[in-house]
Image (cartoon, helix red, strand yellow):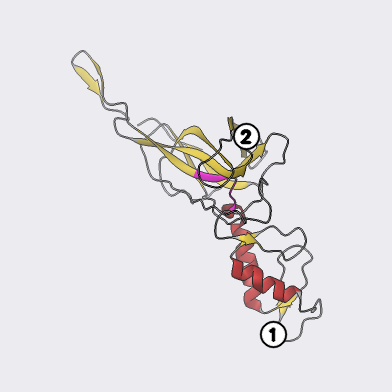
């Protein structure tokens, strides 16, 4: 089973434009080279045939035990419907339903294909004209990048940022998956050029989302992000 892990790193930086992003982490799914592949430490839950929510292996094991119980619909006292997916009427203890809801909420941050990271760039230093100098953006700054794993080396990868309200494309980039790196298959990395600044990367509102696709394949699940701009400093 293929595994890899990823996490978000974001800091406050002085710059022209800001983008706050949700990190993506997760563990290997049952098949490689698929947009719903989990990163290291997670596996598909398998509450149903198409349930590819990435969870801790212990949750998958418990889900298998629940599926084998044969108890559906008419729950006895002390049990509730699991509700891991629409129409999931498996009777479980309340804590299992709570866990399913938490895992569903965290699903997009546990993927190996869409991992939001920062890129650190050296500052350009002071700009001087005669005897006067400007120190705007003198120090290092960070931009938002997207990377991912478990792709076929040489495949073309398209990354899109879309506005959540109307699906308008806010940013798009393409790159080629390279052999090597983290994981036994190909990986990609693309810098959006958007400067990180101003506060927590998890701060709402999450006004946009990121999707990734390898040529000839399907789009990854949507990864919600906060996309905003700030003025020159």
Q: Can residue 146 be seen in this view?
A: yes
Horizontal arrangement in the rendering, residue 10 relative to residue 133 (left or right) = right
Horizontal arrangement in the rendering, residue 9 relative to residue 107 (left or right) = left
Single out the mark in the foreground, 2 or 1: 2
Q: What stretch is highlighted in magenta?
A: 111-116
Q: Does the magenta stretch include residue 114?
A: yes
Percent position (x, y) of residue 79?
71, 81
Residue at the image position 76 percent from the left and 58 percent from the top:
50
Residue at the image position 62 percent from the left and 34 percent from the top:
157
The quadrant in which residue 63 appears is: bottom right
State whether residue 41 is above or below residue 93.
above
Which residue reaches farthest left? Answer: 131
- Specify which label sits upstream in the sequence, 2 or 1: 1
- Between residues 89 and 146, which one lies in front from this camera angle? 146
- The overriding secondary structure of the stretch rendered in magenta is loop
Q: Name the residue under label 2.
A: 157
Residue at the image position 47 percent from the left and 38 percent from the top:
144
Which residue reaches farthest bottom? Answer: 77
């Amino acid at each position: 089973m293929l595994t890899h892990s990823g996490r978000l790193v974001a800091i406050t930086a002085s710059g022209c434009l800001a983008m706050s992003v949700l990190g993506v982490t997760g563990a290997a799914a049952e098949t490689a080279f698929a947009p719903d592949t989990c990163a290291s430490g997670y596996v598909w839950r398998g509450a149903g045939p198409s349930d590819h929510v990435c969870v801790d292996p212990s949750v998958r094991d418990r889900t298998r035990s629940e599926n084998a119980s044969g108890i559906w619909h008419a729950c006895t006292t002390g049990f509730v419907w699991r509700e891991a997916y629409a129409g999931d009427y498996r009777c479980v203890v309340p804590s299992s339903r709570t866990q399913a809801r938490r895992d569903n909420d965290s699903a997009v941050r546990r993927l190996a294909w869409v991992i939001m990271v920062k890129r650190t760039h050296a500052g350009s230093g002071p700009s001087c004209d005669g005897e006067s100098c400007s120190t705007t953006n003198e120090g290092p700054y960070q931009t938002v990048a997207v990377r991912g794993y478990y792709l076929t080396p040489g495949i073309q990868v398209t990354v899109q940022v879309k506005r959540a309200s109307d699906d308008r494309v806010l940013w798009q980039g393409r790159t080629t998956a390279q052999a090597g790196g983290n994981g036994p298959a190909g990986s990609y990395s693309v810098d959006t050029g958007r400067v990180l600044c101003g506060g927590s990367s998890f701060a709402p509102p999450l006004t946009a989302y990121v999707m990734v696709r390898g040529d000839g394949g399907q789009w990854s699940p949507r990864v919600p992000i906060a996309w905003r701009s700030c003025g020159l400093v």
